[in-house]
Amino acid sequence: MAKLVFGMLVSLDGYVDHMEFAPTPKLFRHFIEEARGQTGSLYGRRMYEVMRYWDDEHPEWGDAEREFAEAWRRQHKWIASRTLTEAGPNASILGENLEAEIRDLKARLDGEIEVAGPDIAKSLTDLGLIDEYRLYLCPVVIAHGKRYFAGPRPPLKLVAHDRIEDVVRLTYVPA
């Protein structure tokens, strides 16, 4: 059975914003390894459109960016969207019954499915479908952007914490 994991970089004041702060090279290496090990990723439309950046080659990329792009392209992507009519390579758009489709994915697949983005994470949290939350707590305060928890925070239990340079990864499961 697959496990849904919502993990993102988050500021000390609870915001996620990929334009405001980025991972260090060591943390980016961690995310490359995570992407290599994932069964796939689950996106809402907006986050999927941001991540489509990795579909194309960019001449300014170094080795790490190429490695991440390769890992990202390899995994399947599922997109929850009412407006998209087509998806990019190795991606599919989910139908109207999000809960049934996600339950089916979890039952059919093994491994870890990344949940990418606070909005889709809120929908899946409301349905009780997220198995693990990983907050990569960064030492910045930005006071704007999207909140990591887009709605009320579910009751959580801390199961692990570790440090990657100046970032602390907090791992929680529903209590």
Image (spheres, rainbow, N blue to C red):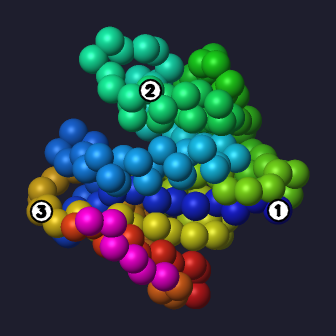
Badge 2 crowding class, 10 Å Cα cut-off, few under 14, some 14 to 19, many 20 or more, is some
Instruction: Where is residue 122? Give x, y as percent.
Output: 50, 59
Is residue 168 visible in the rendered image? The answer is yes
Give the label on residue 72, or none. none
Q: Amino acid at mark 1?
A: Met
Find numbered disc 1 in the image and state the secondary structure of the residue it sits on.
Answer: loop
Question: Which one is nearer the viewer's eye here, 40 or 149?
Answer: 40
Is residue 146 visible in the rendered image? The answer is no
User: Would residue 164 be counted in the magenta stretch?
Assistant: yes
Circle 1 or circle 2, nearest the eye: 2
Give the label on residue 66, or none. 2
Instruction: Where is residue 152? Give x, y as percent.
Output: 42, 72
Find numbered disc 2 in the image and state the secondary structure of the residue it sits on.
Answer: helix
| Rendering quarter of residue 88 | top right
Give the main secondary structure, helix, strand or loop, of the magenta stretch.
Answer: strand
Q: Residue at x 57, y 23 (%)?
A: 84
User: Would residue 87 be counted in the magenta stretch?
Assistant: no
Q: What residue is pinned by disc 1?
A: 1
Badge 1 crowding class, 10 Å Cα cut-off, few under 14, some 14 to 19, many 20 or more, is few
Mark-to-mark CA distance, 1 and 2: 30 Å
Q: Amino acid at mark 2?
A: Arg
Mark-to-mark CA distance, 1 and 3: 37 Å
Q: Which of disc 3 and disc 1 is earlier in sequence?
A: 1
Q: Which of disc 2 and disc 1 is earlier in sequence?
A: 1
- The stretch of residues the image draws in magenta is 160-165
Q: Residue at x 63, y 69 (%)?
A: 131
Q: What residue is pinned by disc 3?
A: 141
Q: Amino acid at mark 3?
A: Val
